[in-house]
Amino acid sequence: MNQLNDLYEPNWENTANKLMEYHVEALFVHDQHSRLLTINENLGPTVPAPAFFLGRTIDGKAVCRFRYDVADKTATRLQELSLEEPSISEFPAKPKYFAEYMALLHGQQYTMGPCYFVPRKVTPSLQVKSLTRENAANWLPHDFEWLIRELDVSQPCVALVHQNRAVSICRSVRITNFAHEAGIETLKEYRGNGFAPAVVAAWAIAVRKLGCLPLYSTLAENHSSQSVASKLGLAYYGSNFTIA
């Protein structure tokens, strides 16, 4: 049995801070000083990381990271403020010190969203297929053809196939040795049929077989993704906030 799952899963509520650390490490490439460098993309051009990441958790602790070019004095003040952020029990509004964070970094844009852990009890309600480069051409014409070139670096990848056509997929889009972040795509005409929850559940099982933890996060405005989390009963452990 995998030691990571044994250590963290039975009492995941007490390890929200650790899950948030796994989350930020999956999202971004760090330097030797734990400063943010780039977004952790397997394909495509290199994209700079945001200037500031704040992960508030249900255990009252916050995970704070800064881009490599943020001045030390500014980083110190951001860290001090983050330590005063209150604990959260559900996806909340803006951080307590939102205005101060934005002012310190002269921020123009920000993002925020809920973070979830996929418990072991979550299982797919529908049959899905694992996708690899060898079999993908059978089910990915037209709608998901773009995915074929990404399959080697987006594993595990699973799909719900309807009439010999992949209509909903879930794959690993941010990967570390300890955790994978889910990426979901469902064709518009097939949404609302329970397909997305099924592929997320199957994907999580595949991630566990690799000895890693399955994580799921989304943006505040993405209500459909939050609905998937609710339908699956995913475990909410905190909220992320970034300033570009």
Image (cartoon, grey):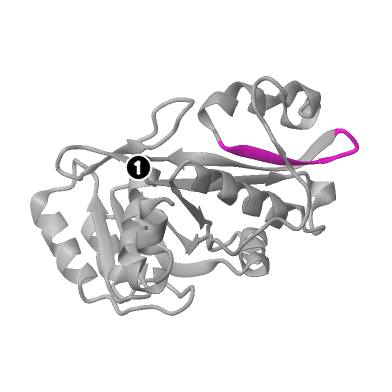
Q: Tell me where residue 141 appears, x and y as whole percent.
A: 79, 25
- What amino acid does circle 1 point to? Phe
Q: Tell me where residue 157 appears, x and y as whole percent.
A: 62, 37
Q: In this orientation, which residue lies closer to the viewer: 28 or 96?
A: 28
Residue position for label 1: 28
Q: Tell me where residue 75 appears, x and y as whole percent.
A: 15, 55
Residue at the left extreme, as displayed:
73
Direction from residue 120 to residue 244 in the image, left or right: left
**Which quadrant would residue 193 be assigned to in this image?**
bottom right
- Count residues near mark 1 (Cα–Cα under 10 Å), then give few for <14, some for 14-19, many for 20+: many
Residue at the right extreme, as displayed:
163
Most frequent secondary structure within the magenta stretch: strand
Q: In this orientation, which residue lies closer to the viewer: 97 or 130?
A: 130
Q: In this orientation, which residue lies closer to the viewer: 224 or 14?
A: 14
- Residue 243 shows in this picture: no
Residue drawn at 72 percent across, 31 percent down: 144
Direction from residue 10 to residue 139 in the image, left or right: right
Direction from residue 195 to residue 12 in the image, left or right: left
User: Magenta residues?
Assistant: 156-164
Direction from residue 62 to residue 206 in the image, left or right: right
Residue drawn at 67 percent across, 40 percent down: 158
Residue drawn at 42 percent across, 57 percent down: 5
Residue at the front extreme, as displayed:
1
The answer to if 132 sits in the magenta stretch is no
- Residue 187 shows in this picture: yes
| 205 up-or-down from 37: above or below | below
Residue drawn at 16 percent across, 38 percent down: 32
Q: Secondary structure at mark 1?
A: strand
The answer to if 159 sits in the magenta stretch is yes
Q: Tell me where residue 12 appears, x and y as whole percent.
A: 41, 68
| 155 up-or-down from 120: above or below | above
